[in-house]
Image (cartoon, rainbow, N blue to C red):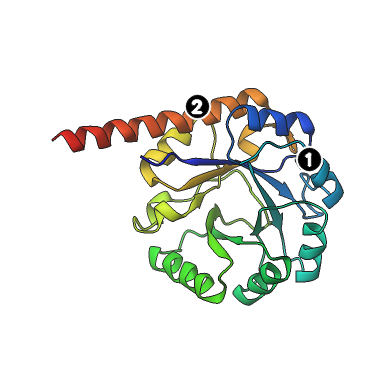
């Protein structure tokens, strides 16, 4: 049984970082996009990361940043993983990752007419483009960049791709268990669904979200255990 990994994104305050870690988040996301209400500077992010325990991943979200801008952030903030969330091409992502010497995740914003074949082709394109590519994050397409708190059609995700993706887009305490049971993703990513207001997290919502994901994991484990006995 592989438990679902959990990323809490858009952290801006020390108390929110502490809450995410205390409740069992595997990764924390920091937004380096000036137009976002969750934006932090490289220096702010470095301070937020300074007291993290071992084995908690740090992810930097970038939107249409140049390779040099990405490298400037990683020179200050100890990011473990890059997340490209704009209109970057596979080559641009590869160049930025190579300059920063960091693996990267590519966000794919799923539209109503997206097909499973589109997702598989997109993953192949990025995996071919760079050895630093680590996987896709699937979000809902909206006109603006970044999360909009909207769910896309999870049935579009091919079963062979699901165990490698990070599922995002409109996740909440209410739908998290169902999302994991239906998709079986490698990880989930949430931001607005655990907030009091934009950029300000709610510790109780983080705890409830983690519990909802773990409930799904427990259900899957029971199902797999029953299958092994039959």
Name the residue that disc number 1 marks.
Answer: 50
Q: Residue at x 66, y 58 (%)?
A: 82
The kind of secondary structure element at disc 1 is loop
Q: Report the side of 43 relative to 163 (left or right).
A: right
Where residue 114 appears, as percent x and y from the top left, is 45, 63
Mark number, residue 16: none
Where residue 85 appears, as percent x and y from the top left, is 65, 59
Position above or below: 29 against 172: below
Q: Is residue 201 visible?
A: no
Q: Residue at x 39, y 68 (%)?
A: 117
Where residue 90 appears, as percent x and y from the top left, is 60, 73
Q: Report the side of 224 relative to 165 (left or right).
A: left
Position above or below: 71 against 191: below
Position above or below: 108 against 96: above
Disc nearest the viewer among 1 and 2: 1
Quarter holding residue 150: top right
Position above or below: 154 against 22: below
Question: Image quadrant for the C terminus?
Answer: top left
Where residue 10 appears, as percent x and y from the top left, is 71, 43
- Residue lying at the far left in this picture: please name it: 230
Closest to the observer, 160 or 97: 97
Quarter holding residue 222: top left
The crowding category of the residue bearing disc 2, from other C-alpha atoms within 10 Å (few below 14, some 14 to 19, many at least 20), is some
Closest to the observer, 150 or 76: 76
Name the residue that disc number 2 marks.
Answer: 211
Cα distance in 3D space between marks 1 and 2 = 27 Å
């Amino acid at each position: 049984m592989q438990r679902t990994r959990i990323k809490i994104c858009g952290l801006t305050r020390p108390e929110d970082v502490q809450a995410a870690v205390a409740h069992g988040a595997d990764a924390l996301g920091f937004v380096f996009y000036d137009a976002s209400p969750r934006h932090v500077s490289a220096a702010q992010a470095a301070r937020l990361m300074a007291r993290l325990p071992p084995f908690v991943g740090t992810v930097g979200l970038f939107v249409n940043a140049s390779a040099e801008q990405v490298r400037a952030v990683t020179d200050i903030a100890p990011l473990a993983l890059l997340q490209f969330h704009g209109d970057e091409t596979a080559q641009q992502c590869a160049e930025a990752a190579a300059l920063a010497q960091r693996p990267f995740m590519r966000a794919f914003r799923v539209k109503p007419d997206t097909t499973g074949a589109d997702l598989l082709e997109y993953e192949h394109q990025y995996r071919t483009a760079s050895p630093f590519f680590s996987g896709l994050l699937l979000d809902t397409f909206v006109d603006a960049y970044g999360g909009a708190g909207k769910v896309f059609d999870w049935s579009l995700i091919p079963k062979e791709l699901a165990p490698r993706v990070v599922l995002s887009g409109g996740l909440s305490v209410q739908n998290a268990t169902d999302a994991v049971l239906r998709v079986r993703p490698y990880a989930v990513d949430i931001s607005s669904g655990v907030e009091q207001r934009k950029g300000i997290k709610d510790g109780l919502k983080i705890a409830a979200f983690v519990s909802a994901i773990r409930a799904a994991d427990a259900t899957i484990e029971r199902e797999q255990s029953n299958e092994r006995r039959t």
